[in-house]
Image (spheres, rainbow, N blue to C red):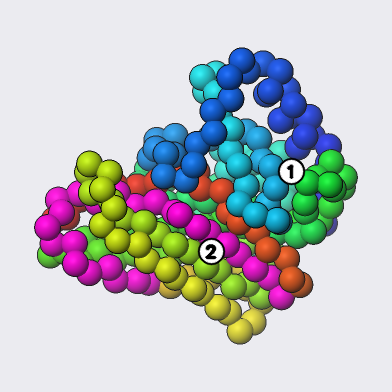
């Protein structure tokens, strides 16, 4: 059983005290090499917010999982989530009865992580593998909106993806082909929306922590 204790809020408050200016970064402004997670507000009622500072405070997925003592049904899934990746789209969230009013109490949550990997990018066709992981088995429904931009930040298109499972699982996987990219040497990919629901009527909006740029070969 996982227990999220008041350390979540204490850590966040310490960060505020030591920071003169807090900058809010929306989804598309999180760079490929900037994986930061400091303060988490919300989570159940709407998209969470992420705050970073010039102090370069960073918390890896491994640290996040071990700090809050999440237990995993599958050692393989735990290893995948804790791993650092160079060029993927990543996001995380907490699935359970969490909102702004009870965030300081001990509550049972599942740790959710999405990892979107490029499989190939040839002749204008990009093949992606979309993964949703959980530390424990859930009957999950995942919904993603991916946005694709050129090197200059101009939006090319977006893609809405829904993944359903008929039985509880700790890993959802689906592959998607994105066509019509033959005029672009490089494509930036980031999450505009990442939402995961459980059969217990819990919803989490995942917080993006990493974007990726892919070359058309």
Horizontal side, residue 104 vs residue 190: left or right: right
Name the element at disc 1: loop
| Residue at x-position 52% and y-position 68% | 143
Q: Residue at x 51, y 74 (%)?
A: 163
**Quadrant where the C terminus is found in the figure:** bottom left
Which residue corresponds to mark 1?
68
Q: Which residues are magenta?
A: 175-199
Q: What percent of the width, then of the height, locates residue 142?
A: 55, 69
Secondary structure mostly seen in the magenta stretch:
strand
As for residue 167 lying within the magenta part, the answer is no
Point 31% across, 55% down: residue? 148
Per the image, the residue denoted by label 2 is: 132
* Above or below for 138 versus 151: below
Q: CA distance from mark 2 to mark 1?
A: 20 Å
- Mark 2 is surrounded, within 10 Å at the Cα level, by few (under 14), some (14 to 19) or many (20 or more) other residues, namely many
Q: Few, some or many C-alpha atoms within 10 Å of disc 1 (few <14, some 14-19, many ≥20)?
A: some
Image spot of residue 63 (x, y percent): 63, 38
Mark 2 or mark 1: name the one nearer the start of the chain: 1
Label 2 secondary element: strand
* Image location of residue 116, percent across then percent down: 42, 58
The quadrant in which residue 125 appears is: bottom left
Q: Is residue 66 visible?
A: no
Outermost residue, front side: 154
Residue 108 - label: none
| Residue positioned 58% across, 25% down in the render | 22
Whether residue 207 can be seen here: yes
Q: Nearer the viewer, residue 163 or 115?
A: 163
Q: Residue furthest bottom?
A: 166
């Amino acid at each position: 059983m996982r227990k999220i204790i008041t350390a979540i809020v204490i850590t966040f408050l310490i960060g505020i005290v030591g920071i003169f200016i807090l900058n809010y970064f929306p989804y598309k402004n999180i760079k490929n090499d900037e994986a930061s997670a400091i303060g988490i507000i919300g989570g159940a009622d709407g998209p969470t917010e992420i705050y970073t500072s010039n102090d370069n405070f960073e918390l890896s997925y491994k640290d996040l999982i071990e700090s809050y003592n999440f237990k995993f049904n599958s050692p393989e899934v735990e290893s995948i989530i804790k791993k650092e990746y160079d060029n993927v789209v990543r996001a995380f969230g907490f699935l359970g009865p969490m909102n702004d009013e009870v965030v300081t109490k001990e509550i049972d949550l599942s740790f959710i992580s999405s990892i979107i990997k490029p499989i190939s990018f040839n002749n204008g066709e990009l093949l992606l593998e979309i993964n949703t992981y959980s530390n424990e088995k859930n009957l999950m429904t995942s919904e993603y909106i991916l946005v694709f931009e050129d090197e200059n930040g101009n939006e090319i298109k977006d893609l809405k993806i829904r993944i359903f499972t008929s039985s509880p699982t700790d890993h959802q996987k689906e592959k998607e082909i994105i066509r019509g990219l033959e005029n672009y040497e490089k494509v930036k990919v980031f999450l505009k929306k990442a939402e995961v629901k459980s059969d217990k009527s819990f919803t989490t909006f995942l917080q993006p922590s990493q974007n990726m740029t892919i070359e058309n070969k």
